[in-house]
Structures are given as structure tokens and as C-alpha cells.
Amino acid sequence: MLAGCQTGPRRGPAVPVAPQQLEVAVLVPLTGQDGEVGESIANAAKLALFDTNNQQIRLSIYNTEEGGAAAAAGRAIAEGNQLILGPLLSEQVRAVTPLAQRARVPVIAYSNDAEAAAPGVYILGFSPGQAIERVVLHARQQGATRFAALVPTGTYGERSARAFLGAVQRAGGQVAGVQTYGSLADGRSAARRLGNRGAADAVLIADAGRNAASIAPSVRVGPRLLGTELWATDRALGSTTRLRGSWYAAAPEARFQQLVTRYRARYGKAPVRLASLGYDSMLLTVRAARSWQPGRRFPLRALN
């Protein structure tokens, strides 16, 4: 009876406490014209977690088409994410950068614009400068000496032109001419003008594969056609006769096909080429997790 009258704190049943996780956000378009690209990147990032059997990282996907990339980054940061993977486009990276820097949350972006990099903001995308350097050097090693280029107006075209001129100089070649264009019709006219201004052994078309396929037939027969990393996203290039035998630089196809096989087995369809960025960024994150403690900031030294 005395025991039954004792008072004091009563302890309820033990409640299991979930272990803390490392919070990582992926910012990609899940709707709109780039929705398929964003879905492939997000799925590939999840696939990398599955393949590595990592249960410490909690991955959250944010749609940059819902209010914009800055709004998506704001939600991700407010919800406790300590690392942002994405967004996809350079202008989106620039919109996200000040928010991420204020919150001291690093960004590993999928853009191919090296000039979008900033303190705490890293670029993982395939750089046109790297692709152009590699394909020009390869053409030079195969005997090409005179190089010409067709580049679209705009930021990508300007950077491609600069990369082209530098690559030809470093390879010991000569520039036969550079023509710019604002539309596909202009591009075809530019190709014809290029052919009238002197012989070239190789002609770079610094544009997306489908645009190159439209312009290529207007390039005179003879020069080897060269492309940029954008060609890797178009699987139908071989259907254009003038593009057969062309060269472009891209990530090794064998490794990507391994990803395609695993992706198709899990999601029932093939990914777009840029899905490899999602997979690789998550592998990088998993490696960094070895020295990343829950509740702590992401260890930037892991990116060195």
C-alpha cells in the first residue's frame, strides 16, 4: 500500500528516435519544356543512392518550374537542406547563388556555364570549352590544319567562339573563318558564305544536334564536321547524311550505357543523356558523406 502511494515523475514507454540524416536538395525542372531532363536527373540521383545503399542521406526534389529556381532554393534552405544539387540553367544558378551564399549552403550546379561559378557555387555540367578543345585537338592530330566555325548568336555562341579560337591556336592550326547566325535560315546562309571564303579541313557547328542537322547540309562537301557536347543529347544525328563521320567530344558512352541499363530496370524507360549529371553529383555527395556529420555544414574540402 505504501508503495502504491509513492509519487514522482512517471516515465512512459520508450519512443524510438530516428537517426539524424544528411539533408540534400535537388533543384530541377519537373514540368515544362525541360521536364523530361529534370526528371531523368532527379531519378538518376535517387538511383545513385540506391546503388550505393546509402541510408544516411535524405534526398528532396524541388521543381524549379514552380515559382522559379530562387523560390525552390529558398524552400530547400528553409527546410534544412545543407547541400543543393542543381539547378540546370546558368541564369537559374545566378538567381540561386545569393540565397545559398547567405545561408552558407554550397551549390553543385548542372549548368555548363563556367562563368556562373562563384564562391560556394560549383559547376558540374559539361563545359563547351572542354569539348571544343578536345575535338579540335583530335582533328588536328588527324591532319586538319585549317579550321572554321559556325556559332549562334548569344552567350553560348560567344563562349564557343572564344573557346574555338583558343583551341585552334593551342593546337597549332589556322582559323579559316568564323560565321555567326541568329536563326536556322541564317545558319544555312552562314554555312554557304563560309564555303565561299576559302577551304577548311574542319568546320565546327557549335549548336544543338537538331540545329546542326539542319545547318550541316549547307556546308560544302569536303571538310570534316565537328560538334560540341550538345550533340551528345541527340540520338538521331546519324539520320542526317552530312553529319555521318562527324566528330564531337562527350563523356564515354560505355559508362552511360551502364547507367541506362540500371535506370531502365528501375524506372522502365531510358534516361536522357544529362541524367549522368544527377548520378555523378550524388556519387560525389555520398563520398563527401564520409566526413559530413548530421547537423554540420557540408565539408567543402570534400570537393577538392
Image (tube, rainbow, N blue to C red):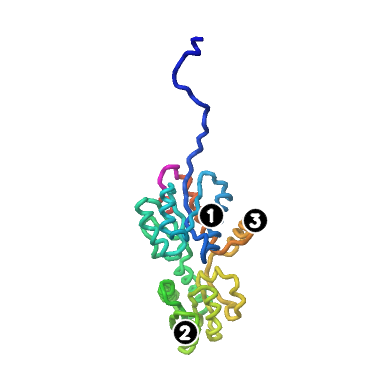
Residue 95 visible to an observer of this rendering: yes
The earlier-in-sequence mark between 1 and 2 is: 1
Report which quarter residue 119 is drawn in: bottom left
Element class at badge 3? helix
Badge 2 amino acid: Ala
Residue 217: which disc? none
- How packed mark 2 is, by other alpha carbons closer than 10 Å (few <14, some 14-19, many 20 or more), is many
Magenta highlight on residue 294: yes
Q: Position of residue 204 (x, y in %)?
A: 49, 77
Q: Amino acid at mark 3?
A: Ala
Indicate left or right for 266 with 14 as reference.
right
Residue extent of the magenta highlight: 292-299
Query: Which residue matches tag 1?
Result: 45
Residue occupying image coordinates x 39% and y 65%: 115
* Magenta portion: prevailing SS class: loop
The residue labelled by disc 2 is 190
Badge 3: few (under 14), some or many (20 or more) residues near its Cα, within 10 Å?
few
Horizontally, is 180 left or right of 261 in the view? left
Residue 174 visible in this rendered orientation of the protein: no
Picture residue at 47% right of the left edge, 83% below the top: 186
Q: Residue 162 location in percent, x, y? A: 40, 74
Residue 265: mark:
3
